[in-house]
Amino acid sequence: MSVLMNTIVFEDCRNQWSVSRPLLGLILLNEKYFSELRASLINSQPLPKQEVLAQCFRNLIEGVEQNLSIKNRDRFTQNLSVFRRDVAKALRSDGYTEQCSLDMMN
């Protein structure tokens, strides 16, 4: 899970679909570790960016249910695409001007 999240956040991940499928299963399997990983990634950033990243993570799991149905996996893949874009924007910004998308379906 850590490797996949770091790939999404810090590297050029071109095929998000192939990363999103196993990532959702791992998140659902070990929610505690995902929470710890999320906190670690957020806390590793400067204070002004932490709330923006926290919102990005909230948006990532918004509307995602506790199952691996096709509809749920598709929703997570869409959320992951927006998450990746918003996190990249937040990490490039000064932390005050950039905000994560509120609607993950855009």
Image (cartoon, rainbow, N blue to C red):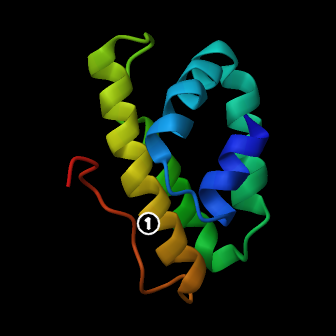
Is 77 left or right of 4, judged from the image as shown?
left
Placement of 29 over or under 43, stated as above or below = above
Q: Residue at x 72, y 53 (%)?
A: 6
Is 97 left or right of 38, judged from the image as shown?
left
Q: Residue at x 77, y 43 (%)?
A: 3
Q: Position of residue 7 (x, y in %)?
A: 68, 53
User: In this rendering, does residue 63 appear at all?
Assistant: no
Placement of 70 over or under 56, stated as above or below = above
Q: In this view of the protein, which residue sits in the foreground, 20 or 64?
A: 20
Q: Amino acid at mark 1?
A: Asp
Q: In this view of the protein, which residue sits in the foreground, 103 or 24?
A: 24
In what quadrant of the picture does the C terminus appear? Answer: bottom left
Residue at the outermost left position:
106
| Disc 1 packing (10 Å; few <14; some 14–19; many ≥20) | many
Q: Position of residue 63 (x, y in %)?
A: 31, 30
Placement of 17 over or under 84, stated as above or below = above
* Location of residue 2 (image quadrant): top right
* Location of residue 32 (image quadrant): top right
Instruction: Return the residue at label 1.
Output: 86
* Location of residue 53 (image quadrant): bottom right
Placement of 44 over or under 16, stated as above or below = below
User: In this rendering, does residue 50 appear at all?
Assistant: yes
Q: Position of residue 11 (x, y in %)?
A: 66, 64
Q: Residue at x 43, y 12 (%)?
A: 68
Q: Residue at x 56, y 89 (%)?
A: 94
Disc 1 is placed on an element classified as helix
In what quadrant of the picture does the N terminus appear? Answer: top right
Is 33 left or right of 86, judged from the image as shown?
right
